[in-house]
Image (cartoon, rainbow, N blue to C red):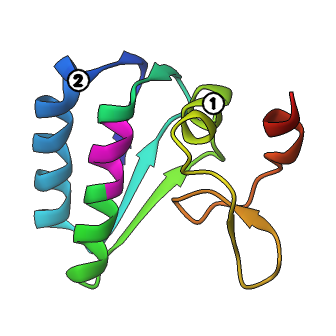
Amino acid sequence: MIPLSGRLTLRDARAICARLREAMAGSNRITIDIQDLKSLDVAVVQLLLAARKSAEQQHKSLSISPLPSEALQTILIESGLAGHGGDDGERRDAFGLASNFKERQDA
């Protein structure tokens, strides 16, 4: 489990990247805990997306728990990464998590 907390920006990306690499080297299933995450910028989202893609290429699992916080939902919407369709017809974000983004996007 990799806990992310506080307000994360580009300045935090190097340390987060190192933690993700270490976790992927030691496990096939990585969970990022965003329970205490207050905010993050697009650079951190891009890092998480790259980590997810890297994990998939290595046949590993990278997940986020609990469901996206308001901070993550906001940045996913603003960056255009929210709202990808899922196989079940439910709207999904770029991490594959089902969420109700419709209300936030209409606001």
Q: Which mark is residue 98?
A: none
Q: Which residue is mark 2?
A: 10
Residue found 83% across the figure and 78% down from its top: 89
In this rendering, would 38 be left or right of 41?
A: right
Quadrant including the C terminus: top right
Q: Secondary structure at mark 1?
A: helix
* Image height of 98 relative to 55, above or below: above
> On the image, which quarter does residue 18 sit in?
top left
Mark 1 belongs to which amino acid?
Answer: Thr
Residue 73, given in percent of the width and then of the height, sits at 64, 37
In this rendering, would 24 be left or right of 47?
A: left
Query: In the depicted view, which residue is nearer to us: 33 or 13?
Result: 13
Residue found 72% across the figure and 85% down from its top: 87
Q: Which residue is mark 1?
A: 74
- Confirm whether the magenta stretch covers residue 47: yes
Q: Residues within 10 Å of mark 1 (few under 14, many from 20)?
A: some
Q: Secondary structure at mark 2?
A: helix
Mark 2 belongs to which amino acid?
Answer: Leu
Residue 60, given in percent of the width and then of the height, sits at 30, 77
Residue 23, given in percent of the width and then of the height, sits at 19, 55
In this rendering, would 77 be left or right of 63?
A: right
Residue 53, given in percent of the width and then of the height, sits at 30, 69
> On the image, which quarter does residue 24 sit in?
bottom left
Magenta stretch secondary structure, dominant: helix
* Range of magenta residues: 44-49
Query: In the depicted view, which residue is nearer to us: 33 or 77?
Result: 77
Mark 1 or 2 closer to N-term?
2
Measure how far apart labels 1 and 2 are at the Cα level: 17 Å
- Confirm whether the magenta stretch covers residue 16: no
Residue found 58% across the figure and 33% down from its top: 78
